[in-house]
Image (spheres, rainbow, N blue to C red):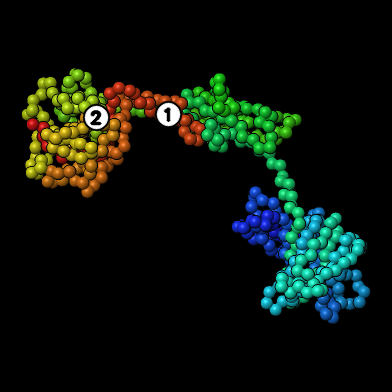
Amino acid sequence: MTIMEKKSRLGRAAAGLLAAALTLGMAGFAGTTAASAADAKYETYDFQLSGLPTHNDSVKTSALGIVAVNSDKDVPKAVLNDGTATKDAHTTETKYVGVKPGEYTVTYTATGDQQKTAQVGMYTGSATTDGIFHSNGRYSSFSLAVKGYESSTTVESKKVNLSPAGAYLTVLGGDKTGTIHLTSTTPSQPDPQPTTKSVSIIDEQGETLTAGTLTVGVELGLSAKVTNVDKDYFTWGLTQTDKVIEFVDNGANPKTDVRVKALKAGTAKVTLTGRTGTAAEGLSATLTITVKEKQETKPVDPLAKFNDKERAYLEASYWVLPSQTDTSKGFDGWSPTKTVYTKLTATDLKGLKNSVPNYSVQDADALFHYIGATGRDEGGAYYATYKNGKKVGLGADYDTQTVTYTGRESGATITYVFTMLDKVVLPGSNTPNKGGETDTTKKPAADTTAKKPAPAATTTNANAVKSNGLAKTGADVTTGVVAMLVLLGAGAALTLRKRA
């Protein structure tokens, strides 16, 4: 047998909004739980009196026994009259349910044609003899009426003291009976929660780690996260066949319990083990770390698709600034394959000019070409100027200038973008249409918005830490004159007018 299901509700009279959730409980009855976590809770039980089992007697009597018990295993079992004798051993009640010992207010409700009153008896004690539950204490009784039907012989509510365990109510049932309700008059104590101890390994962000990857040279801070146990009872350790990782100094102001460093490629385990004889005995956590070698990024040659003659011209190209600072070699081995960005000062940008030693204009016309505004094939490079991301005439004020070379023989394209901006926004597509104007119906193959100037060379930052606490290599940014690289996609030649 199990104790009847209970429901909790707010004790404060002013409490208004209650969150109700259906629960299943003792003896299969259903109730609701309604309470705010910040407010006192009062035990409430609802028991239907109709549909109870019946004795096998002439009138098919039924009754519900509501017994105060300390545990659901103490709820009595009903023994029904088998109808073979008038004095066979059976319990008075045909069903028993359990409630916690205490003082309750008892009320009664009915719907439709159900009886408007209920007959309730109370015993201050009970006993079980030869398997038969029976009364063993003082008896009293009262009649409950639904709200609005109170009379001189009935009450709408009644306080009863079902304490200690063993006190109980007996209530007559029947097909036309309603529901009896018991509400405790004092706040209930929360059921004691089992003490669960646990441990896990977390990173500096508090994320639990069980496995991950590090790059050689990267360090990782780790801490123990414990529940209901002191972390001082745990010992950190490493399990590895070779020296793949090691513990390193955690610094003067450590943010984590320990710190490990990846030394060489391989697999190792970081262990956290509860010491024998302490409250942490038997608890442990493990983090499996796979260490990988550093991946050296091979430089990309942006001129790889040009033929030898075209490449020789471009490699000899020297963009001269008033300060004679060479920024033309932004394509020297590290840039993407289509576009080179070089950031200049406003003065340098407006004084920008180009000279190619040992080459003539005719050489450029023979090696490179573009489709002009009239649709004719023109020799040389495309030039264009932009202001705030919009193309402007060559005589207008501008903050960005682009020069695009397309090899006649190879078909390869590279665009040099000289700008004084930190971000370069070129509207529309970078692919010319037949009329020679920029096609604004298509987007560039790569996003050219919100791009910061990139370094003229990349370096490995071995201490870059990802959100999961496992570090990987990253890129560092150099200062001074820097070049920003953005891919414009295949055939990404801007439709530009040739500089006079």
Q: Position of residue 495 (x, y in %)?
A: 15, 40
Question: What residue is drawn where x is 75% and y is 66%?
Answer: 107
Q: Position of residue 211 (x, y in %)?
A: 54, 36
Identify the residue under disc 1.
473
- Quick one: 223 or 241, which is closer to the camera? 223
Q: Amino acid at mark 2?
A: Met
Q: Report the residue marked by disc 2.
A: 420
* 289 to the left or right of 440: right
Q: Amino acid at mark 1?
A: Thr
Which type of secondary structure does the marked residue at label 2 adopt? loop
Task: Residue 168: tell me if it is visible.
Answer: yes
Q: Earlier in the sequence, mark 2 or mark 1?
A: 2
Question: Residue 451 placed where, x, y %?
Answer: 31, 35
Position in image of residue 155 (x %, y %): 78, 69
Kindly identify the residue that appears in the image at 50 percent across and 35 percent down: 468
Residue beneath the point at 76% across and 54% down: 186
Whole-angstrom CA distance, mark 2 to mark 1, is 30 Å
Q: Quadrant of the C terminus?
A: top left
Q: Quadrant of residue 447?
A: top left
Residue 174 vs residue 370, the one in the foreground: 174
**Quadrant position of residue 2:** bottom right
In the rendered image, the quadrant that contains the N terminus is bottom right
Could one spot residue 62 in this view of the protein? no
In-image side of 113 versus 262 (left or right) = right
As drawn, 62 above or below 309: below
Question: Is 279 situated above or below 354?
Answer: below
Label drawn at residue 453? none
Element at label 1: loop
Residue 142 occupies quadrant? bottom right
